[in-house]
Image (spheres, rainbow, N blue to C red):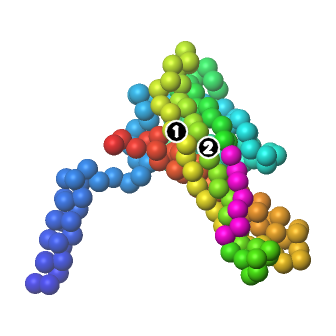
Amino acid sequence: MKNGWKRRSVVVLVLMLAGCGYHFAGSGSLPAGVSRVFITILENRSAETGVEKTFTNDLIYEFTRNRKESLAQELSSADGILTGSIVSLTVENIARSTVSTAVERRVTGTVTLRLESPGGRTLWSSGGIVERQAYAVVSGDKTATDQNKSDAIAALSKKLAESAYNRMTDDF
């Protein structure tokens, strides 16, 4: 008797979720009927050298992970071209042990993306996508702090790529 009730509850829950249009983030279709996307290297407008490669690779990985068949290997085989910029990467202190000593910082990244047709017509644009990642400041060890910052930027890049992919494939 109890198992039958549980099964009916699960079925009702699944039907309710399906009925309200619930779906997992990033599971929708690409904008404007695009089926194959070519991703260009992002423009780096930040002061951090080399992050354009990391951010672009994470964006490519996000497509590969979620929808490998939609990633065009060559520009000529794409019906959508994804371009964009790393607008900024800023660092701020978020925790201090004294007025002049930070123990934790946060890096904030902003990217903008645009999906265009091969003819240059804008099919979708993201606006500013912003993510944040905290990292520890190691007292007296600049090398360790710099490594923590690099790790935070890498984690931030993954968050930005996931957010960008989810926004682009969100059918709302």
Q: Is residue 92 above or below residue 47?
A: below
Q: Residues within 10 Å of mark 2 (few under 14, many from 20)?
A: many
Q: Residue furthest left?
A: 1
Q: Is residue 90 magenta?
A: yes
Disc 2 residue type? Val
Q: Is residue 31 above or below residue 52?
A: above
Tag 1: amino acid: Gly
Residue 120 in the image: above or below residue 88: above
- Looking at this rendering, what residue extends furthest in the top direction? 119
The residue depicted at 21 percent of the width and 65 percent of the height is 13
The secondary element bearing badge 1 is classed as strand
Position of residue 7 in the picture relative to residue 145 (left or right): left
Residue lying at the far front of the rendered structure: 99
**Mark 2: which secondary structure?**
strand
Residue 54 falls left or right of residue 8: right
Pointer 1 residue? 127
Label 1 crowd bin: few (<14), some (14–19), many (20+), radius 10 Å: few
Q: Position of residue 32 (x, y in %)?
A: 41, 28
Q: Looking at this view, is 160 or 40 the one in front?
A: 160
Q: Tell me the magenta residue range.
A: 88-94
Q: Which mark identifies residue 111? A: 2
Give the mark nearest the N terminus, 1 or 2.
2
Rendered residue at 67%/70% (across/down): 94
